[in-house]
Image (spheres, helix red, strand yellow):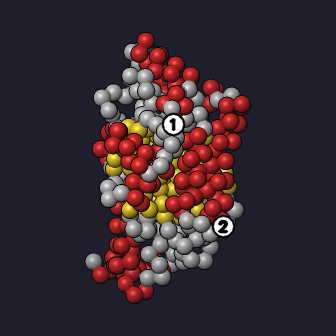
């Protein structure tokens, strides 16, 4: 046993130190994962998605580069994707069985693990902002439906007409689902939920997720996106995570918290084993990736699919998805700036070990 501990301590000591070339800030975003068919992706479509992802990435990056808060950066990035009809959040949200658009969102601040969430909201243009107001201006974490809307009105949020959220493409998906007795997975092809995670220059982490859910959802169905611990989690000691995918499975695995918990345990074990000699309880990028992949594999084995984005206190920005693609992007203070759609499109050097 002693030998093991000594070996672990030695291994840790030989790892590169965290501080030197770790980015000062780091941001990752997603616009949903899914069974994306490269043949269906016309150059125009691709350009449109990439442009909106890039705008979201740039908005968040600017705040972080200027020394702003991770919380502000993720909100700025998410708002742009909520306003884009291309993603299943805000404008362009999928339809419920009854033909309405019901929005869910959640946000978490890694500094103090304060969190806010809303579900089933129909008249708030940017649900992520309402989730944040629940966090800052209420004694609760999670509000739903009419109550959430009453809270929004009290806090001065404008009432957005429900038609604003409806797009012809999403309505057509609902009609096809009903006519052909399909499932949401058949008509959606991808989970278009949006999310962002960030590390700011002060070392704080934040995560947020916003969605319309899944086409044809019934009976007030709520997925993982607004559930703290399933679709969103942030803890300065471990990481910030936002998920997209088949919500029922992400709920059952508790994906976002599970990833953060495994990372935090890894950090704690490393620190304990290295004792006084610990340079830093640093978790290497491949170890972070391993943890994220293992949790996504758990989702897959249960029958679910989707993906996650995460950022660590060392600025590592990781993607993990068990679908053919995930609309995504990442940027950091070291000059990384890229958006991608299908698997394996990142530059190989994008996740260096610090
Ligand atoms: N996770 C979302 C849900 O189940 C769907 C998505 O990611 O698009 O509601």
Decide: is 306 above or below 62.
above
Query: Badge 2: how crowded within 10 Å, few (<14), some, or many (20+)?
Result: few
Q: Is residue 191 left or right of residue 183?
A: right
Q: CA distance from mark 2 to mark 1?
A: 32 Å
Q: Residue at x 60, y 38 (%)?
A: 84
Residue extending furthest bottom?
276
Horizontal and vertical percent position of residue 260: 39, 60
Decide: is 254 above or below 205.
above
Quarter of the image for the C terminus: give it.
bottom right
Horizontal and vertical percent position of residue 162: 48, 30
Q: Residue at x 54, y 53 (%)?
A: 75
- Mark carried by residue 160: 1
Q: Residue at x 38, y 22 (%)?
A: 98
Residue identified by numbered label 2: 66
Of circles 2 and 1, the one toward us is: 1
- Mark carried by residue 145: none
Q: Is residue 34 visible?
A: no
């Amino acid at each position: 046993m002693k030998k093991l501990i000594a070996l672990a301590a030695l291994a840790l000591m030989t790892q590169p130190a965290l501080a030197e070339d770790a980015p000062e800030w780091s941001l990752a975003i997603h616009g949903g994962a899914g069974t994306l068919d490269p043949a269906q992706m016309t150059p125009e479509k691709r350009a449109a998605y990439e442009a909106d992802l890039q705008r979201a990435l740039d908005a968040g990056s600017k705040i972080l580069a200027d020394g702003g808060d991770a919380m502000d950066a993720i909100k700025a990035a998410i708002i742009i994707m909520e306003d884009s009809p291309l993603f299943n959040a805000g404008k362009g949200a999928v339809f419920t069985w009854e033909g309405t658009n019901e929005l869910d969102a959640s946000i978490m601040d890694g500094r103090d693990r304060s969190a806010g969430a809303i579900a089933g909201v129909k008249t708030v243009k940017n649900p992520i902002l309402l989730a944040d107001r629940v966090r800052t201006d209420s004694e609760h974490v999670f509000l739903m439906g009419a109550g959430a809307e009453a809270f929004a009105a009290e806090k001065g949020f404008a009432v957005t007409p429900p038609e604003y959220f409806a797009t012809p493409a999403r309505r057509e998906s609902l009609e096809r689902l009903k006519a052909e007795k399909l499932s949401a997975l058949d008509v959606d092809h991808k989970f278009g939920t949006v999310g962002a995670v960030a590390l700011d220059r002060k070392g704080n982490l934040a995560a947020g997720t916003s969605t319309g859910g899944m086409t044809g959802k019934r009976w007030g169905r709520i997925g993982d996106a607004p559930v703290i611990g399933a679709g969103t989690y942030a803890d300065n000691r471990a990481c910030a995570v936002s998920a997209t995918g088949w919500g029922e499975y992400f709920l059952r695995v508790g994906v976002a918290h599970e990833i953060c918990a495994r990372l935090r345990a890894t950090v704690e074990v490393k620190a304990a084993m290295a004792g006084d000699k610990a340079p830093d309880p640093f978790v290497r990028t491949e170890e972070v990736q391993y943890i994220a992949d293992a949790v996504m594999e758990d989702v897959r084995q249960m029958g679910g699919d989707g993906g996650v984005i995460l950022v660590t206190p060392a600025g590592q920005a990781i993607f993990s998805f068990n679908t053919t693609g995930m609309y995504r992007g990442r940027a950091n203070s070291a000059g990384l700036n890229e958006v991608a759609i299908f698997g394996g499109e990142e530059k190989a050097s994008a996740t260096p070990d610090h």
